[in-house]
Image (cartoon, rainbow, N blue to C red):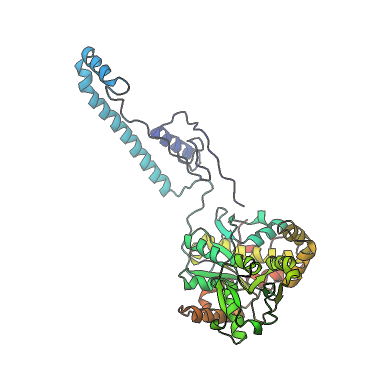
Amino acid sequence: MARPSRGRRAPRDGGRGPLDRAVHGRAARRHGRCSSWRDDPEDGPRAIGSARPIPASPERSSPRRLGGGRGGARASAKRHRFQPRTEVHLRPFIDRIRSLATFAALSALSALSTLIASSGCKRDGEASAAATLAPDAPIPAEIPRETRLSIGDPTVQKQLQLSGDIDRLPFRVDWQNISGGPQTIEAFRAGVLDAGAVGDTPPIHATFTGVDVKILTVQVREKPIYELATAPGAQVASIGDLRGKKIAYSPGQAQGALVLRVLKKAGLSQKDVTLVQLGSTEFKEALTSRQVDVAPLAGVTLMRYLNEYRAEGASSIAHGVRDNLGFLHVRAEALKDAHKAAALYDYAKWRARAQLWAYAHPEAWIEAYYVKDQGLSAKEGRFLIEAAGKPQVPRDWSEAIALTQETADLLAEASGQKRFEARTIFDLRFQTIGAEVAGAAEGAGPTDRPATADRSTP
């Protein structure tokens, strides 16, 4: 886990100047410690969350000018009247000498810093620069402890916490409370997120919009993810009743692709219905306000909707199409960093193990997540676990790639986007990780290391 950031501290260097600091750093190296004055914890306060000291305010390199300060003009006249004229003439030379001394000190410091950099020294807690990794190069085994990932995977984060494995990750994680395609893609675009958990559509949408992503893990649920929830009084008993109805539609998310697949299965086109474009977080409210007749809902949201509005006539129907894929996808740029690529490879292992742990410990997971975190009853939590079934982690991604290609082609046709080969967004170097962990973790305790985690560095 990420170490706590270092707070501000008052400088305790006794007024050490640049040249003194340079000498101090040289002496430290003679005693066998790779250091520079900038690395010295006593050199000054550090910015919160940073290992770099806050630069001190530059000291005056020249004395106060004659006549400066309050009442300067009068004081200057008095000094000119009673002081020898030679002092006035010598002052520029004194200033020049002091300036040259300061310049010499700074030059010596610059040379020393260059020497330290060339010797390969680095600050404590700072990772070594990672080599650039080619897209088809093997994932390195070494993970420097200082390697840091930014991950939006809230459910797995909770599973890792409960299993006790979150403190044992051999790299640092900045956990982000980000989920769903639109948020994840925007965070990728801004460069503030390395990996995020999504359904089967966001990687396609990201590719359409010019965001280079790669899929690292594939999960297949035993049962469908979504059901078509209907508004009270909507009179929809099957997908054949969708003609003329208003349907909630989110083009960049799995729910949007699902709607298009359902219409195709029902023999309907977009012209036969009214697609109401909304964010998936707005679907439930749109149903209750009768803004739409139908919306795809899943999990906790579906459960809450039916509990609250079933008495008023709300219901849900099965859609009969395949929608059980889930992905962990990343910014392709992150995989070019050899250290991050190694950490992501290892995270894929811990992630698969966490999901299997939650399934193997249903009561602990229900109590901690569904009851305490999501506010459901234990009975409702049990229903959701049974509805999801055991997580499947296929060793061969051929079927997932084929299904993703069908979805990509459907979305390209509907939106006018250029078709692309779905296999290009799957990183096959990660293909067998989940299956290996699933096989090795049979019978393992909740805090045992995954048997396939030999590539990581503790």
Of residue 244 and residue 316, the one placed in the foreground of this image is: 244
| Marker count (numbered) | 0
Q: Is residue 330 above or below residue 42?
A: below
Q: Is residue 306 left or right of residue 9?
A: right
Please tell me which residue is depicted at 49% across the width and 62% down the height of the picture: 337
Tell me: 22 left or right of 352. left
Residue at far top of view: 82
Could you tell me if residue 378 is visible in this image? yes
Using the rendered image of the protein, determine whether residue 389 is visible from the camera's viewpoint: no
User: 181 left or right of 382?
Assistant: left
As drawn, 435 above or below 243: above
Percent across and percent down for residue 326 are: 62, 71
- Of residue 199 and residue 400, the one placed in the foreground of this image is 199
Residue 82 percent coordinates (x, y): 23, 12
Query: In this view, which residue lies farthest toward the bottom?
Result: 267
Q: Position of residue 353 (x, y in %)?
A: 69, 65
* Location of residue 56 in the rendering, given as x and y in whole percent from the top left corner: 43, 36
Image quadrant in which the C terminus is located: bottom right
Q: Residue at x 59, y 63 (%)?
A: 179
> On the image, which quarter does residue 245 sit in?
bottom right
Which of the 4 quarters of the picture holds residue 63?
Answer: top left
